[in-house]
């Protein structure tokens, strides 16, 4: 058997030190009544150095257990918040509102990766007549994003949410109050009505609910997608997204 690499040996020794520290704590608290002898420390150290695969296997098993625990926790969290994620009556909806699979996106209009993802999402909706798309306005990049999110939600009252949404996602510059109103005019929104509707605090409340939901789901950035029992963070390629949608279609939604 070949000798372990210096890096692996360092990992093993570090873990060994942690192991001994843990044992020392157990002895100090009285859970064990015998001290760790110097001879045992030496023998354990030599054994791990000569048989590093033992510790590697233990690490792998630990990681597998951690992943399984995280998956179970995620499944529980998604089940607890299922209606908020998939069936919020105040959230804008695209695609087939009665579709058999729902794709949810948390996004910010100033997020460059959200803008890159937008054509892929549109393509997914176009290619899949059974796909429902739920928009979660989650402005995390400053006041401009906040204003744009509120304006987008307010545009629902004029039946132009999707046109407005796509217009802002396709915009090349920074999204702020001025550019938001320019895009609103370009897509045919009545600006005076939009200004009046923006005064409604219901849109502020909707954004706050999205923030709380993102926090509960431990979402940390945009874009983030939820489909079936998966949370997918970051820009995703078309093929993996389609696989996730296909997987969700095989399972009932919560």
Image (tube, rainbow, N blue to C red):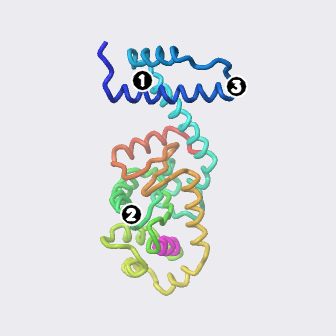
Is 245 displayed left or right of 238 in the figure? right
Q: Which residue is mark 1?
A: 56
Residue 246: give x, y in percent of width and height: 43, 41
In this rendering, the label closer to the viewer, 2 or 1:
1
Determine the residue positioned at 46% across, 83% down: 190
The residue positioned farthest toward the front in the image shown: 38
Quadrant of the frame with the C terminus: top right
Q: Nearer the viewer, mark 1 or mark 3?
A: 3
The numbered mark, 1 or 3, whose residue comes first in the sequence reads 3
Q: Which type of secondary structure does the marked residue at label 2 adopt? A: loop
Q: 37 and 166: which one is in front? A: 37
Dominant SS type (magenta): helix
Please, is residue 180 above or below residue 108 in the view?
below
- Residue 159 visible at all: no
Q: Quote the CA–CA distance across marks 3 and 2.
A: 54 Å
From which residue to which does the magenta span run? 146-154
Question: Vertically, is 72 above or below 41?
Answer: below
Tags 2 and 1 in contact by the CB under 8 Å rule?
A: no
The residue carrying pointer 1 sits among few (fewer than 14), some (14 to 19) or many (20 or more) residues within 10 Å by Cα, namely some
Instruction: Give the label on residue 30, or none.
Output: 3
Q: SS of the residue at dot 1?
A: helix
The residue to which callout 2 is attached is 111
């Amino acid at each position: 058997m070949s000798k372990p690499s210096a890096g692996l040996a360092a990992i093993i020794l570090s873990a060994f030190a942690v192991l001994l520290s843990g044992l020392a704590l157990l002895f100090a608290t009285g859970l064990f009544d015998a001290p760790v002898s110097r001879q045992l420390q030496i023998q354990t150290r030599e054994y791990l150095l000569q048989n590093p695969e033992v510790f590697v296997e233990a690490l792998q098993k630990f990681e597998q257990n951690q992943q399984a625990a995280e998956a179970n926790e995620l499944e529980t969290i998604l089940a607890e918040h299922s209606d908020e994620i998939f069936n919020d009556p105040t959230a804008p909806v695209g695609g087939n509102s009665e579709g058999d699979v729902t794709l949810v996106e948390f996004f910010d209009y100033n997020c460059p990766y959200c803008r890159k993802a937008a054509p892929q999402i549109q393509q997914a909706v176009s290619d899949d007549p059974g796909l429902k798309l739920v928009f979660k306005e989650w402005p995390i990049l400053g006041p401009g994003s906040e204003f744009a999110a509120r304006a987008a939600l307010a545009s629902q009252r004029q039946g132009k949410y999707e046109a407005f949404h796509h217009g802002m996602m396709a915009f090349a510059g920074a999204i702020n109050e001025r550019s938001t109103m320019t895009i609103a005019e370009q897509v045919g929104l009545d600006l005076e009505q939009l200004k009046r509707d923006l005064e409604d605090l219901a849109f502020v409340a909707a954004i706050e609910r999205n923030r709380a939901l993102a926090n509960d789901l431990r979402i940390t950035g945009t874009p983030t997608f939820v489909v079936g029992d998966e949370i997918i963070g970051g820009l995703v390629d078309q093929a993996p997204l389609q696989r996730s949608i296909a997987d969700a279609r095989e399972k009932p939604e919560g």
